[in-house]
Image (cartoon, coloured by chain):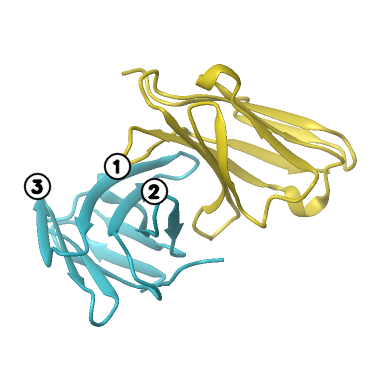
């Protein structure tokens, strides 16, 4: 069990740029989740996949956000035309059905 | 949006003392989970209690659940410096989509 891996750990970008984050889940986990966490708050659900199918998206996930999980393995989260309010920690988690979620250490996004 | 509230928002105690954190939530749940987060790191799952359970233990952790009051508590006994972290409760509303509280920042003073 190598754990959930997220890349990069930190991303600094200018407002208006596009960014993409990657998450590699624990290999046998068929569910993958994305959360966003701002300073001093708990994580907020963004979206989740079961295998390659994206089954639910939060209304927090505006049209500028897109997530994919090709072949049901790693996942990417892209934010287009970044805004100041996108600054946050983006957390990925994976699980087996009905089992607790295992979290990665997140990608911290800073928008200049 | 956050499911519920945690109390206190911050807690500072001496090493060896017990720490109690409370969580309230708003809707019906399948289960409630507690997670720990060290600064700058991801969340680590501590314990899960199902809606038909009232109390659960794991090592130095004791969790209670009162579904009539929509509340839960996490007790950490004999605290250690390594327990310094933020603690979050999370409710499972189905499909394991977790809804987190705002967390309690726990500081253990040596």
Q: Residue furthest right?
A: A16
Give the residue at mark 3: B59
Residue A53, x across and y down, in percent: 55, 32
Q: Quadrant of residue B63?
A: bottom left
Asked if the residue at tag 3 contacts the one at tag 2, i.e. Cβ–Cβ closer than 8 Å, the answer is: no
**Chain under disc 3:** B
Q: Is disc 3 placed on a helix, strand or loop?
A: loop
Report the side of A80 relative to A75 (left or right): right
The hue used for chain B is cyan
Q: Residue furthest bottom?
A: B69
- Asked whether B30 or B75 is in front, the reply is B30
Gap in Å between the C-alphas at discs 1 and 3? 22 Å
Gap in Å between the C-alphas at discs 2 and 3? 25 Å
Q: Is disc 1 placed on a helix, strand or loop?
A: loop
Q: Residues within 10 Å of mark 1 (few under 14, many from 20)?
A: few
Q: Which chain is yellow?
A: A
Gap in Å between the C-alphas at discs 2 and 1? 7 Å
Same chain for mark 2 and mark 1? The answer is no
Same chain for mark 2 and mark 3? The answer is yes
Give the residue at mark 2: B96
């Amino acid at each position: 069990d190598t754990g959930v891996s997220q890349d990069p750990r930190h991303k600094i970008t200018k407002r208006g740029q596009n960014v993409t984050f990657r998450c590699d889940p624990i290999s046998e986990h068929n569910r993958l989740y994305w959360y966003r966490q701002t300073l001093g708050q708990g994580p907020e659900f963004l979206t989740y996949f079961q295998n390659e199918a994206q089954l639910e998206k939060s209304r927090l996930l505006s049209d500028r956000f897109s997530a994919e999980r090709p072949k049901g393995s790693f996942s990417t989260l892209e934010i287009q035309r970044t805004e100041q309010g996108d600054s946050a920690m983006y957390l990925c988690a994976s699980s087996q059905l009905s089992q607790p979620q295992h979290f990665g250490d997140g990608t911290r996004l800073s928008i200049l | 949006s956050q499911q519920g509230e945690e109390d206190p928002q911050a807690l500072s105690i001496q090493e060896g003392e017990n720490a109690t954190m409370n969580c309230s939530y708003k809707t019906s749940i399948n289960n409630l989970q507690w997670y720990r987060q060290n600064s700058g790191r991801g969340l680590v799952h501590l314990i899960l209690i199902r809606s038909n359970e009232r109390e659960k233990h794991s090592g130095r952790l004791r969790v209670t659940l009162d579904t009539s009051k929509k509340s839960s508590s996490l007790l950490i006994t004999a605290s250690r410096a390594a327990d310094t972290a933020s603690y979050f409760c999370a409710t499972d509303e189905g499909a394991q989509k977790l809804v987190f509280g705002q967390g309690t920042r726990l500081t253990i003073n040596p």
